[in-house]
């Protein structure tokens, strides 16, 4: 479960927008947080909030937006159309975080989205897009020459979304994070869905790849180990999933990992011996093998869990 909101986003401190209050001395030096107070607020309340931001904050000062509760997030899709409508005004918008809600507000797998493709089309200069939740999330393959960071956090990422990301042309993308999640929460992404990402042909600038929170962590690790994209990476993140010794051995048997700055495997099911082997094999790499998990047994069956599920 996610317990805290973002205090900074895209290198800027997050400041809640409250209509009618005095603006910061430098309104362009903050990421504006838009959120209604009640989880069951009427749709009009969030509409009014967006309109107030458009009216009260100079358009050129809207550089980054963090969208919190918009009202009944568990069943009403986040109204991306309001951001699309503002595109002609917010020409300086460079970063958007959709659905910065914590577990106490709405479980990550209940957060409801719609089609986010129009947002990317409306903001060709957008550099950072972070999305939390994947229920109802839709994306068509796109060509976007401005995006540098794309992060999709989920308890279960639909294969259709993974395929759309993988089939997109994102020549400026430096960081890609996909939380693959679990099947019981809609996570039916497969290694085959990720094949274009691992090939890296349309991602020439990719340096940070996270395929994490994954129930299929071992197959993902095995695929990454032989992937053409691996030699150009600086950071490889396979954390928060159910990685076992099988996946770690595949990493060690694959292409060299010594060029990495960081290998993040925290929250895993690795044996102590395997953890020691990884660290010893990569002396110049920051290897994070913290937070080992214990396999749970119930009625003769063994269970392993991702860090973020429901």
Image: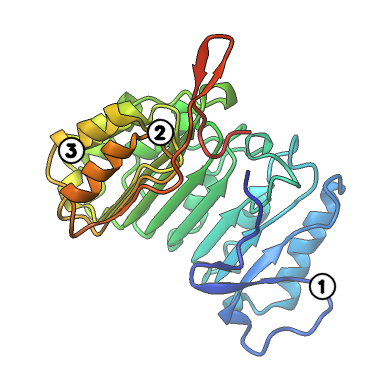
Rendered view: 114 above or below 20:
above
- Give the secondary structure at mark 2: loop
Which residue in the structure is indicated by mark 3? Answer: 252
Q: Which image quarter holds the C terminus?
A: top right
In front of the other: label 2 or label 1?
2
- Give the secondary structure at mark 1: loop
Please state the horizontal and vertical placement of residue 161, each as a whole percent of the image: 46, 33
Which label number is shown at residue 152? none
Q: Using the numbered discs, state the Cα–Cα distance from disc 2 to disc 3 in whole angstroms.
A: 16 Å
- Tell me which corner region of the image, top left, top right, bottom left or bottom right, holds residue 36: bottom right
By what rule are the colours in the image chosen? Answer: rainbow
Which label number is shown at residue 19? 1
Q: Earlier in the sequence, mark 2 or mark 1?
A: 1
Q: Using the numbered discs, state the Cα–Cα distance from disc 3 to disc 1 in whole angstroms.
A: 55 Å
Please state the horizontal and vertical placement of residue 252, each as a whole percent of the image: 18, 38
Which label number is shown at residue 269? 2
């Amino acid at each position: 479960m996610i317990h805290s909101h973002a205090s900074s986003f895209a290198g800027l401190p997050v400041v809640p927008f409250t209509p009618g209050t005095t603006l910061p001395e430098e309104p362009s030096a903050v990421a504006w947080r838009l959120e209604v107070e009640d989880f069951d607020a009427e749709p009009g309340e969030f509409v009014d909030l967006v309109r107030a931001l458009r009216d009260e904050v100079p358009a050129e000062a809207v550089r980054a937006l963090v969208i919190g509760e918009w009202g009944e997030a568990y069943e009403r899709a986040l109204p991306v159309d309001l951001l699309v409508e503002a595109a002609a005004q917010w020409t300086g918008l460079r970063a958007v975080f959709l659905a910065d809600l914590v577990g106490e507000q709405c479980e990550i797998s209940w957060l409801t989205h719609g089609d986010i493709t129009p947002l990317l089309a409306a903001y060709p200069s957008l550099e950072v897009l972070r999305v939390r939740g994947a229920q109802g999330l839709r994306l068509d393959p796109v060509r976007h020459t401005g995006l540098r960071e794309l992060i999709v956090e989920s308890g279960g990422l639909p294969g259709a979304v993974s395929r759309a990301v993988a089939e997109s042309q994102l020549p400026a993308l430096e960081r890609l994070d996909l939380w693959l999640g679990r099947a019981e929460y809609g996570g039916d992404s497969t290694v085959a869905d990720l094949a274009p990402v691992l090939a890296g042909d349309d991602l020439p600038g990719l340096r940070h790849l996270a395929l994490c929170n994954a129930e299929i962590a071992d197959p993902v690790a095995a695929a990454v180990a032989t992937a053409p994209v691996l030699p150009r990476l600086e950071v490889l993140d396979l954390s928060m999933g159910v990685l076992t010794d099988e996946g770690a051995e595949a990493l060690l048997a694959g292409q060299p990992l010594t060029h990495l700055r960081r290998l993040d495997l925290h929250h895993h099911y690795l044996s102590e011996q395997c953890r020691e082997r990884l660290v010893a094999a990569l002396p110049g790499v920051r290897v994070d093998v913290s937070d080992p998990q214990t396999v749970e047994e119930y009625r003769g069956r063994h269970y392993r869990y991702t860090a973020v599920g429901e």
